[in-house]
Image (spheres, rainbow, N blue to C red):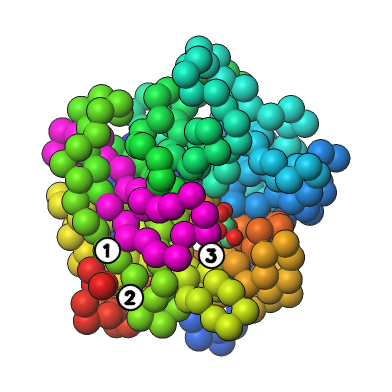
Amino acid sequence: MSSSPTTIVGPALPRIPWEDKPKGYPYPMWRYSGNPIIRRDQIAVANSIFNSAVVPFGDGFAGVFRIDYRNRTCRLHTGWSKDGINWQLEEESIRFVDEIKELPFEYGYDPRVVWLEDRYYVTWCNGLRWEPTIGCAWTKDFRTYHAMENLTLPYNRNGVLFPRKINGKYAMLTRPSDPGHTPFGNIYYSQSPDLKYWGDHRFVMGPGGGWQRSKIGAGPSPIETKEGWLLFYHGVITMCNGMTYSFGAALLDLEKPWQVRYRIDPYLIAPREPYECAGDVANVCFPVGMLADSASGKIAVYYGAADTVIAMAFTQVDELIEYIKNNAVANPAGK
Ligand code: BMA
């Protein structure tokens, strides 16, 4: 871990994929001009490829991708990239060694990946008798994945591990839910001595106003900054034609991450471009992947668009934090 000249606490990533903000653009986060970065049918089995997570790996990047098949079940697939933008996806889905007999792997979606101590952990929304909970596995090479126990009971989604222990405990955000298209949702914080037994649960935040008024859920693993944990999260507003998914960001206290320091009022990215507004589920921008460079403060977010393709957006940490503070809601914990 290098010392950070910017607000980000963590390693430098000079090869982070990047595109400068368009001249005169007034907002702190901007889309990649080459969006979407992955075609929905990039591999033959796929109906759609979206909501996927990436990390630096070797001299490039690795990722865990959500692929919905042409029979409309979904699985996780490994992907590889030299530049973080062009990806090669494995044709075969991820299989787990040491599979736990009582936890047959039925389906998996919305993976998150985090480097924690000495390995990568993948969490995802895991089918358990078709009831969603938080699945977990670890890998060191993205070739062999070791199954772990589910991290929660059903029903739960959007399980995200922090990249280090906090106060001597592993830490996780989840969003307890229901078996369907959950109409509600608060983010909770849980703690564990061993990544297996979880407790000391704390409420973090619930829905707010406007674009985040029906439900919210954590996005990628939070980024440690000198100002707190920077959390990108999705928020939903239910409109006449269904749920619209946008995303924003909040700063959580470093030592007590269940305390929200600042929470953004306007969204950062909301469905606007054709690939976000039209697809299998219209009007969805769903962030689950992220890369950050502590040397420059650059951040690249990967988000699923319209439950069909993957898109990218960029921001710079100092500009973003300033914007969050200047555009914060009065009651950061929400409802
Ligand atoms: C959520 C999850 C996401 C999906 C979103 C919009 O409940 O299922 O995978 O992107 O709905 O359909």
Circle 2 residue: 208
Q: Secondary structure at mark 3?
A: strand
Judge: label 2 CB < 8 Å from ligand 1.
no
Which label lies toward us, 3 or 2?
2
Q: Is mark 3 within 8 Å of ligand 1?
A: no
Q: CA distance from mark 1 to mark 2?
A: 8 Å
The kind of residue on which mark 3 rests is Phe
Q: Residue at x 56, y 87 (%)?
A: 24
* Location of residue 11 by image quarter: top left
**In the image, what residue occupies the spot 44% across and 31% down?**
136
Residue 209: where, in percent of width, then height?
35, 81
**Can you give x and y, in whole percent of width and height, for residue 266 in the image?**
41, 81
Say whether marks 1 and 2 touch (CB < 8 Å): yes
Q: Answer left or right for 64 relative to 195.
A: right
For image coordinates 44% across by 48% down, the residue present is 157
Q: Nearer the viewer, residue 270 or 158?
A: 158
The residue lying furthest to the right in this view is 44
The residue labelled by disc 1 is 205
The percent position of residue 132, horizontal first and vertical second, equals 48, 42
Q: Which residues are magenta?
A: 165-188
Q: Amino acid at mark 2?
A: Gly
Tell me which numbered mark, 3 or 1, is placed earlier along the sequence: 1
Secondary structure at badge 2 equals: loop
Q: In the image, is 86 to the left or to the right of 187?
A: right
Badge 3 or badge 2: first in the primary sequence: 2
Look at the image and tell me whether residue 46 can be seen: no
Residue 293: image location, x then y, percent: 44, 51
Q: Which residue is mark 3?
A: 314
The quarter in which the N terminus is drawn is top left
